[in-house]
Amino acid sequence: MKPSISIITIGVDDLERAFAFYRALFDIADEQIGAGEDHVAFFFPNDFSFVLFPREQIAQTAGKDVAISGTPGFVLSHQAASPAEVDDILRRVLVAGGAIVTEATQSEWGYSAYFEDSEGNVWELMAQPPAN
């Protein structure tokens, strides 16, 4: 895996407050912002995204209890070229001593999985769905 961090997702306690803060901070057009019930994404040039996500949901995604210290406040994301590459990286994670947090699944956002490195840092692997 050649790391290519294209998405940074940070955990927030108050999505609306965090959105207001980053909206004021970033010099970005409204068309470059996407939002759902549980997230806000800022889309920048060169395929880089900065996403706000509820901290509790990041903990659940990472297989952690919110009350446990060390619950991640961020997720590193690697954009894989294909679902096959996601699966290959997951195999390599296990061989290297990491752990799979969530198995790879297909969703409207693409084919993705989460793993922990040997220190408990959480990574997302994602292959975006093919364009229509």
Image: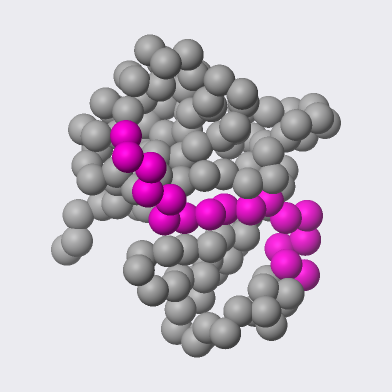
Position of the C terminus, as image quadrant, is: bottom left
Residue 107 visible at all: no
Q: Is residue 14 above or below residue 22?
A: above
**Residue extent of the magenta highlight:** 1-18
Q: Is residue 31 left or right of residue 11?
A: left
Horizontal and vertical percent position of residue 102? 48, 28
| Image mark count | 0
Examine the image and state in which quarter residue 38 appears: bottom right
Quadrant hosting residue 66: top right
Q: Position of residue 122 (x, y in %)?
A: 56, 34
Residue at the image point whose x is 53% and y is 63% from the top: 50
The figure's colour scheme reads one colour
Residue 8 in the magenta stretch? The answer is yes
Find the residue positioned furthest to the left.
Answer: 132
Above or below, 113 relative to 43: above
| Residue for point 46% across, 78% down | 32
**Residue positioned 75% across, 31% down in the render:** 70
Quadrant of image for the N terminus: top left
Q: Residue 9, percent across and down?
A: 57, 53
Residue 56 image point, x, y percent: 72, 43
Depth check: give the residue in front, 23 or 105.
23
Q: Is residue 23 visible?
A: yes
124 sits to left or right of 75: left
Residue 119 against residue 2 in the figure, above or below:
above
Residue at (72% x, 34% y) in the render: 71
